[in-house]
Amino acid sequence: MNGEKEPLLIIGKAARPRAFKNIDLNKLPVMWKFNKKAWMTVDIMTEWLRDFDRQMGAQKRQILLFLDNACSHPKEINLKNIKLCFLPPNCTSVCQPLDQGIIKNFKFNYRTLLLKHLLVNIDDANSAQDLVKIITLLDAIFYANKAWSEVTSVTIKNCFKNAFHIENSKLEEQYDPEEELPLSLLAEIYKKKVPLGITQESFENFFIMDQNLFVEEMQEEFVSDSILKNMDVEKSESDESDDDQESAAEIECSINTYNEAIKSVKALRVFSLHQGDTKALKMLSNLEIHYQEAFLKRKIRQTTLDEFLS
């Protein structure tokens, strides 16, 4: 058990979103799939399993893959190098390694990157809607990929140990489960929320937005009337709001601010993506985070617990 990770599989609503204009989807750092509801389906999961099976065959490996009883997980599929083991029903939160801390660690990393991005651009926004438009789907994919890369093999191994109750008198170092987003980031967002028109309810909803999110197709007998009423009207694969389209940033010859530097890094990131230069993409992700942190250090200081709560 060495904590290996596979690339992320991300599912969207469009075959080619506006943010992917002129981009080769095969060169994205993640696997991109789509359907009208952006859900995991049996077809997508089956395709992924067959690709993964071929990959294991090429490496001459035989593995055991644990799955929960989600409706999108195929029960009958012939695989040569993978044996599927389905967990007992209604106990995913107890014996699913992802639920033992891997998902939490990933979300922590992702939301930290997201908040830094928002704080860097918050002074240029007149409303919460303007602030949301700053983040494109391509940005979100790069942040998700970066967040996943920062989930360590130690975390993954320890989560497997916890899920399967593997005895170990001295567990390896793991990320702090009590660790939360830096108070300085939250405090800065909270200070800006009133002039931006952000309500207390929407501010709190940011942290629970995905608790009741449906991410997979459901069998008809499990779909209640209330769920159907809350579902959005289905959109066509290419029907996206113009608000999602990122206006092209004009790169000046001279860079005088951190904001301009970050925009230049984004332009270089798109160029590297076109070239399929994965090494450059990793370096640019680190460079963007470096500039964001440098920008924030000049604007905010670490907030004490008393200041934050008051």
Image: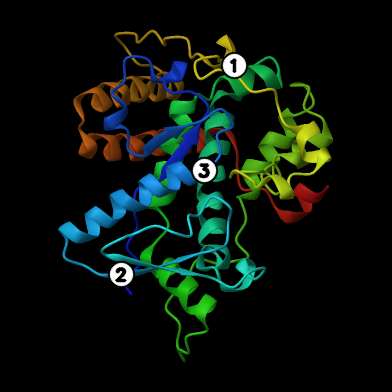
Whole-angstrom CA distance, mark 3 to mark 1, is 39 Å
In front of the other: label 2 or label 3? 3
Kind of element beneath mark 3: loop
Tell me whether circle 3 and circle 1 mark residues in contact (CB < 8 Å).
Answer: no
Residue 244 image point, x, y percent: 55, 17
Neighbours of disc 2 within 10 Å: few (<14), some (14-19), many (20+): some
Amino acid beneath label 1: Asp
What colour scheme governs how the chains and residues are painted in the rendered image of this protein? rainbow
Neighbours of disc 3 within 10 Å: few (<14), some (14-19), many (20+): many
Residue 40 circle label:
none
Kind of element beneath mark 2: strand
Task: Read off the residue under disc 3.
Answer: 41
Kind of element beneath mark 1: helix
Whole-angstrom CA distance, mark 2 to mark 3, is 23 Å
Task: Read off the residue under disc 2.
Answer: 63
Amino acid beneath label 2: Ile
Residue 196 image point, x, y percent: 74, 21
Task: Read off the residue under disc 1.
Answer: 124
- Quarter that holds the N terminus: bottom left
Whole-angstrom CA distance, mark 1 to mark 2, is 50 Å
Q: Earlier in the sequence, mark 3 or mark 1?
A: 3
